[in-house]
Amino acid sequence: MGKIILFFLFICNAGYSLVHPWVGITVGYLFNILGPQYIWWWNFQGLRPFYLIAWPTIAGFFLASLRGVINFEIIKNKQVLFAILYFLFVFLSYFWGPYVDVVNKWRFSDPYQVLIGMLKIFIFFFIGLCCISDENKVKIFTCVFLIAVIYLTYWANIQYLSGKFFLRLRGPADLSGSGLYSDENNFSMLFVVGIPFLFYLGWFFKQWYLRWCLWLAVPFAWHAVFLTASRGGLVGAAFVSVFMGFRCPKKVIGLMLISAFIFAYVWQGGALLKSRAKHIKNFEQESSSRTRLEAWDAGLHMMLAHPFTGVGVGSFGQAFPYFSDRHPRVAHNTFIQIAAESGVLACLFYVLFMCNCIWTLFKKRDKFTKGSLCYYLSDATLVALCGFLICALFLTLYGFEVQFYLAILANSLGYLATKNFLDEENR
């Protein structure tokens, strides 16, 4: 029965996406962020949901372009230019990287599959940039993230209450153990970037019950971070909570929010996370932290040896033994991993791309009517992006869809802010 309903939904989505490609983009990001194919995996056996969503969306985008209904004005900015240049150097590193074809036991991933994955991310991201171009689409597109964060917050806390995990909580996974958030650190990242949406969008709703439903989800999202026992997640959650407190519309509530986070950590932080958190100050002395430093050192040597090409996308593991005598591992730092695998220019354009998103949101929020959805959404996306970058200092996140979802929101909000400003000037 589940598969029949699923096929019906895919058929409906294909029909809508051929006419309105933004629908396919919205559904695609729901799958890429929530991961229903890993939560209810038994209904998806034998199916490739991304392709069932992507192909009608791509076809619909081309048809809409021919009809002249795609607003390409929205991508004429520095943010999109930096993103395209970043992806370009990542793709080129596959062909120029000297370690792409090296096969050894430290080949953690197939560079060709990484390349294909990045190409899929870019195509969907680019179409999303072009399609999410008005306020109504932004509203529906925002619901994707709210649904994902609220459901996975519920899922994480249910695992705790039912006792279905041991020591550290991972995200949903299929029978083979694979999933979007099969690593505890990556799972914690989702809640770090989701908390600002729960908090700021709560301000938007005038109905007290909707506002408090979102606000009450915040401590449960904090608890989900604690359950992962991720130090990077803890630092990220602390950062976004303090940042939200200072950018809160009412300073008293902001101070209460910061105090509530401290209280939640003391009360529900858990012995394992508190034990791991003690080593944050003495980063160099703890074994897990030392291995990260060793990986960063190897990554810096790769970057210095191959500053323009990198060692090749997806080739950090097999290149590691040539640059360090330590045990090979991934970089656990997004910026070092990008620079080591795809070169300094790729990392530079990635940083410029992300910083431009943040600067756009910071600069243009006040061009929206205070109290409007876009006003609060600008703050939510700004804080979420900053939280993501904090997590990126400790995790390898360059292939995660969340950052590109947030970038689409940043681009759309920047465009709408400029459009609103010009409309007011012409009145």
Image (spheres, rainbow, N blue to C red):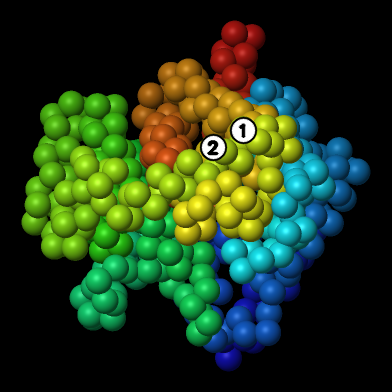
The one of 264 and 211 positioned closer to us in this rendering: 264
Residue 404 position, x and y percent, is 58, 44
Residue 131 position, x and y percent, is 70, 43
The one of 366 and 156 positioned closer to us in this rendering: 156
Question: Neighbour class for label 1 at 10 Å: few (<14), some, many (≥20)?
Answer: some
Q: In this view, does 235 lie to the left or right of 328?
A: left
Look at the picture and state if 194 lies above or below 81. below
Name the residue at 25% across, 71% down.
167
Q: In this view, does 352 lie to the left or right of 374?
A: right
Name the residue at 29% across, 43% down.
284
Residue behind mark 2: 300
Name the residue at 73% across, 38% down.
309
CA–CA distance in space, label 1 to label 2: 6 Å
* Residue positioned most to the front: 325
Residue behind mark 1: 304
Q: For the residue marked with disc 1, what is the amino acid?
A: Leu
Q: For the residue marked with disc 2, what is the amino acid?
A: Leu
> Element under label 2?
helix
Residue 72 position, x and y percent, is 77, 32
* Residue positioned most to the right: 66
Look at the picture and state if 232 lies above or below 369. below
Question: Are the two marked residues, 1 and 2, in contact with CB atoms closer than 8 angstroms?
Answer: yes
- In the rendered image, the quadrant that contains the C terminus is top right
Q: Is residue 133 visible?
A: no
